[in-house]
Image (tube, helix red, strand yellow):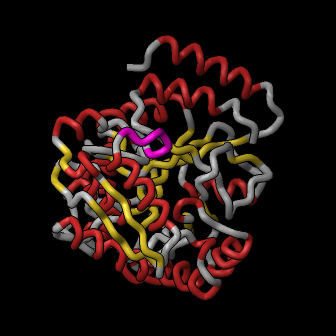
């Protein structure tokens, strides 16, 4: 049920929209629809809150497909107050939790898949780091790790033992906040180091971490990527469009040209083989891109590409650098308030 306060805020936003001479739209960025244990980067939205988001979208905006928005942008015929729902990465819950709710409310979405993880029983590296450091358990007090030819050393001290109570206490911690324990500090340090590595370098570092922790590499069910069969089922019907999100989820702008081309080309080719349909949309992992990256994506045959830069889509927006708004686990009232404010953002 939408509360009265949001209705007033929305009428104000509509009044502002009617008094503009330009049009714009919004692309929403989600990752997971799940009940997560911890969520350092605010990637998860609970099924209940996601349903509340969709109810608001159904009542107050024009929900459209990414390709329709891209076409409207190209033809200077962008429908005002259009909203597109997108998901990055390719978690299994996109099929099992998100798609049934999208079908219930009749709202289309685009899901960008990281092809090197589809069909593989392994976690995304940031989820593995979460499982190793931010979940209850006992770790060695000292970590010595060789990364890309450099040796690093950290001490966990008392936080080598991490209780279930401590994990619950810090469950709402976000990675952009001050780290409350040595484990959280280590998480941030390792994330920053691993983020810019190539896939091979990152795997070697993670293998060392697993050996240090004495942990098996199996993925936790909450963080499981789609299987090949699930990817096919996800794309069935007219509601879900599948886009490419590279093969290994690198920060593209940090890679040499040839490596960027391989990531972009292969992700498109692999998805077209799996789904037997053209793949025309792309999403930059972490939003990382350079002018060279954008040119590679254009030349590969995509019609549009999404960034993670926050903002509205307007008539002058580059279709290969579409801004998106990162949606967090807000209840319906908070999502509605933010949505009404977003429609005042400059395009």
Residue 43 lies, in percent from the top left, at 40, 48
Compared to residue 327, the image places residue 334 above or below, namely above
| Residue numbers of the magenta segment | 175-180
- The quadrant the N terminus occupies is top left
Q: Is residue 134 visible?
A: yes
Observer-nearest residue: 229 or 103? 229
Q: Is residue 103 visible?
A: no
- 162 sits left or right of 305 in the view: left
Residue 110 lies, in percent from the top left, at 47, 57
In the picture as drawn, the residue positioned furthest to the bottom comes out as: 258
Compared to residue 259, the image places residue 113 above or below, namely above
Name the residue: 63% across, 33% down.
342
Residue 57 lies, in percent from the top left, at 48, 35
Observer-nearest residue: 115 or 239? 115
Residue 28 lies, in percent from the top left, at 53, 45
Q: Main secondary structure of the magenta part?
A: loop
Name the residue: 63% across, 51% down.
309
Name the residue: 42% across, 31% down.
330
């Amino acid at each position: 049920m939408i509360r009265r306060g949001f209705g007033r805020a929305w009428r104000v936003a509509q009044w502002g929209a009617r008094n503009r001479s330009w049009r714009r739209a919004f692309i929403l960025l989600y990752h997971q629809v799940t009940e997560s244990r911890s969520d350092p980067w605010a990637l998860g939205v609970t099924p209940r809150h996601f349903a509340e988001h969709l109810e608001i979208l159904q009542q107050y905006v024009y929900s459209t497909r990414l390709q329709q928005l891209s076409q409207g942008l190209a033809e200077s015929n962008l429908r005002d107050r259009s909203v597109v729902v997108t998901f990055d990465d390719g978690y299994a819950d996109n099929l099992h939790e998100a798609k049934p709710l999208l079908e219930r409310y009749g709202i289309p979405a685009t899901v960008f898949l990281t092809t090197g993880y589809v069909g593989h029983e392994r976690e995304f590296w940031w989820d593995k780091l979460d499982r190793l450091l931010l979940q209850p358990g006992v770790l060695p007090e000292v970590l010595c790790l060789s990364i890309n030819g450099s040796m690093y050393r950290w001490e966990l001290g008392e936080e080598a033992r991490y209780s279930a109570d401590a994990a619950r206490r810090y469950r709402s911690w976000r990675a952009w906040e001050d780290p409350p324990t040595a484990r959280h500090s280590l998480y941030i340090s390792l994330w920053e180091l691993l983020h810019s590595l190539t896939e091979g370098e990152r795997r070697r570092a993670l293998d060392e971490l697993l050996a240090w922790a004495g942990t098996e590499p199996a993925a936790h069910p909450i963080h499981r990527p789609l299987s090949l069969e699930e990817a096919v089922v996800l794309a069935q019907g007219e509601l879900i469009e599948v886009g490419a999100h590279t093969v290994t989820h690198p920060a593209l702008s940090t890679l040499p040209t040839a490596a960027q081309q391989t990531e972009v080309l292969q992700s498109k080719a692999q998805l077209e083989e799996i789904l037997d349909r053209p793949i025309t949309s792309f999403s930059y992992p972490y939003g990382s891109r350079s002018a060279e990256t954008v040119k590679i994506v254009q030349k590969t045959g995509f019609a549009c590409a999404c960034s993670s830069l926050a903002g509205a889509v307007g008539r002058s927006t580059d279709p290969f650098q579409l801004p998106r708004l990162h949606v967090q686990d807000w209840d319906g009232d908070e999502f509605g308030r933010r949505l009404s404010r977003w429609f005042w953002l400059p395009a």
